[in-house]
Image (tube, rainbow, N blue to C red):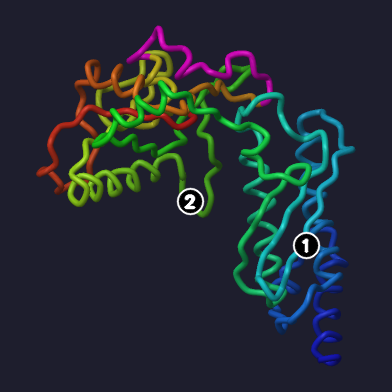
Amino acid sequence: MNFMRAFRRIGLASIIACTLPCPQALTQPLPPAAETDVALDLLLTRQAQKILDDHQLRRSRSTGISVGASVDIQQRKLVISFGAGILPSEDDHSLEELEQYIRNTLEAYTMQAGVGEVETVILYEGKPYWEHFPRGISAQQQGSARQAEGQVLVSSSHGLLRVHPGMEWKFQRPVRNGVQEDLITPGYADELQRLLEDRGGVTVYRARRGVGGAHPDSMRPWYEMSARYHLKDLLPDRTDIWNHFANSTASDFEAGAFAPASSQPFLDATEASLSWPCPVHPGNARHPVRPCSRSRPR
């Protein structure tokens, strides 16, 4: 065991010595350990802090916010803990991309360190994110939820959004390995819709419009647009759905669609208004024409 720990320390030291990830270090898998490794925790914390500081600097914000990381090697559990000062004033999803970046980076390091795949838990001031922004469900909303039985909202997420201050149109995810995630997520939603309809016999609603020409403001195809603009076009008076974060400055994106605790008001509004067919994979012509909608952010 002492030899194994020494070998592991040497490999981790070669990674820690790099300011940026070193390919030669990351390509050398290390033997797994059976206990918490202080050197590995130091590496994970160092990388998480660097990502957080870079994120804050790009947004001209304070870099005095701390983040720590540790991995329980026996349980294969990675815990990422943010200190005070990072949470937004409201649940505006502004931390989603940062959280995902840190998670993916640290999971890659734990894999290369020989721990294997891990369960990741992210805490803000010692609590999960959702505990800071609880959503109460009233008796009326609970009743509405019961009325929505047999109806399902499917979100493919992402899509084009307008970006301030230049007001140009931009996808929400960068191109990675030649893939634009914003344009492939509707395919996953198509498949989920098919399974829900075939196996569950439910009515599926979608939000990102799959057909219908060009979006009038951007002149881009509707299938490229985020749900926000379809909802705005469909329900211009329901700003509580598509412009919930109207006063938020946490993101350059013109974000705003909101997932209500009860989806029944949304279903009621869309069921009578939507007339365009949901997008399906080529060859799946057996699917009936359904009204489409979405309730998840953006």
For mark 2, give the secondary structure.
loop
The residue lying furthest to the top in this view is: 237
What residue is disc 1 on? Answer: 70
| Residue type beneath disc 1 | Ser
Magenta stretch, residue numbers: 233-250
Q: Residue at 66% x, 40% y: name it.
A: 129
137 or 127: nearer the viewer: 137
What residue is disc 2 on? Answer: 178
57 relative to 115 in the view: left or right: right
- Magenta region's main secondary structure? loop
Position in image of residue 254 (x %, y %): 56, 21
Image position of 16 with respect to 53: above or below = below
What is the distance, in whole Å, between disc 2 and disc 1 at their CAs? Answer: 33 Å
125 or 251: nearer the viewer: 125
16 or 118: nearer the viewer: 118
Image quarter of residue 21 = bottom right
Numbered disc total: 2
Image quarter of residue 273 = top left
Which is more foreground, mark 2 or mark 1? 1
124 relative to 217 in the view: left or right: right
Image position of 281 with respect to 291: above or below = below
Position in image of residue 10 (x %, y %): 85, 80
Q: Residue at 40% x, 44% y: name it.
A: 185
For mark 1, give the secondary structure.
strand
How many residues crowd around disc 1 within 10 Å: few (fewer than 14), some, or many (20 or more)?
many
The residue lying furthest to the left in this view is: 286
Q: Is residue 195 one of those drawn in magenta?
A: no
Q: Residue at 22% x, 16% y: name it.
A: 272
Position in image of residue 117 (x %, y %): 60, 69
57 relative to 120 in the view: left or right: right
Q: Is residue 248 one of those drawn in magenta?
A: yes
